[in-house]
Amino acid sequence: MSEGEEALVKSSLCVYLIPAIIAFLYFVLSDQKKGKVKKEEVVKNLGKQLISDNPEMRGEEVIDKEQELDAGVKTYEPYFAEDTPHVALNHVRYTEEEMLQRSRDFYLEINKRRSCRMMSTDAVPRSVMENILLAGGTSPSGAHTEPWLFCLVGNQEIKEQIRDIVEQEELVNYNSRMGDQWVNDLKFVKTDWKKEYLSEAPWLILVFKQTYGLLEDGGRRNFYYNEISTCISAGLLLAAIQMAGLVTLTSTPMNAGPALRKLLNRPPREKLMLLLPCGYPAKDATVPGITRKPLEEISAVYE
Ligand code: IYR
């Protein structure tokens, strides 16, 4: 190579190759940085995404595809025969004054109900809990299918296993699944992933909805409106707990349902809706000083 040719190669290296290498490095590095940001954002938004992907958490009605397919496809002899006799309704009519008094008394009592997260370990008789479950079981249900199953847990070892499962999931719930807004909205409650009440309360009621029933031949019996029916039964449980002079809270252990179901040997057709720790409040129990919406805000009257 002549000296002239060598100089030409060197200068073209400077002019083309070096800027090309710099440009290449710039793109590679800036892309990596972008990748990093994206990853962090994904982790941060994981909870929000999980929530917005989940129609149930957005408050939308979820149509159970399995159940939808079941309904109307298979036929079976109805559980209650068509000729089931209708009997007289056992009803007492009160005077208007009595009605006013009774409705006010019930309101004043139920208005004392507060979600209590500070539980006493004092024992509560099982017979009291059984009356509470019986009250829950008076809920109306689709075609009187009674699609609920209440697990009553008083065994300390099982309560601790339940607490472990719930706390493992709540740690993830509070740190990522719930997202910043939800965690901020809850701060006044002063609760976090630790759930002492699950091992301290003498009893836990785990409220399961049964998505369908089983027929004697192993087939499925449709359980219509199983979710709303079970929710109503939960409301009755809350009222019964209050009337018995005990406290509870409507614990909703997100993502812990399947593990708790397996722990309690319940079948897959049963889905956990709520977990109600139940007992006396701790001596020094406190609750947030909140108010309730006034009647005008929770109702619209058309007379
Ligand atoms: N299930 C969680 C978080 C939680 C969510 C709502 I919305 C509350 O009103 C209270 C708690 C927990 O039990 O801590």
Image (spheres, grey):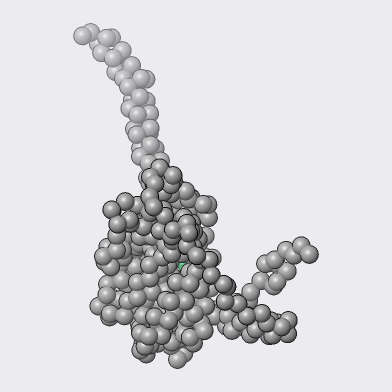
Say which residue appears at 47% left-offset and 62% top-offset: 84
Question: Can residue 74 be seen by looking at this rendering?
Answer: yes
Say which residue appears at 39% left-offset and 37% top-offset: 30
Of the pair 111 and 135, the residue shown nearer to us: 135
Say which residue appears at 72% left-offset and 63% top-offset: 300
Residue 271 placement: quadrant: bottom left
Q: Position of residue 248 (x, y in %)?
A: 46, 78
Query: Which quadrant holds the N terminus?
Result: top left
Query: Which quadrant holds the C terminus?
Result: bottom right
Please, is residue 37 above or below residue 171 in the view?
above
Question: Can residue 191 be seen by looking at this rendering?
Answer: no
Q: Where is residue 254 in the image (x, y as percent from the top left)?
A: 40, 61
Residue 93 placement: quadrant: bottom right
Q: Is residue 133 left or right of residue 13?
A: right
Say which residue appears at 31% left-offset and 71% top-offset: 162
Please, is residue 103 above or below residue 211 in the view?
below
Of the pair 168 and 9, the residue shown nearer to us: 168
Q: Where is residue 173 in the image (x, y as percent from the top left)?
A: 40, 61
Of the pair 198 and 106, the residue shown nearer to us: 106
Of the pair 208 and 185, the residue shown nearer to us: 208
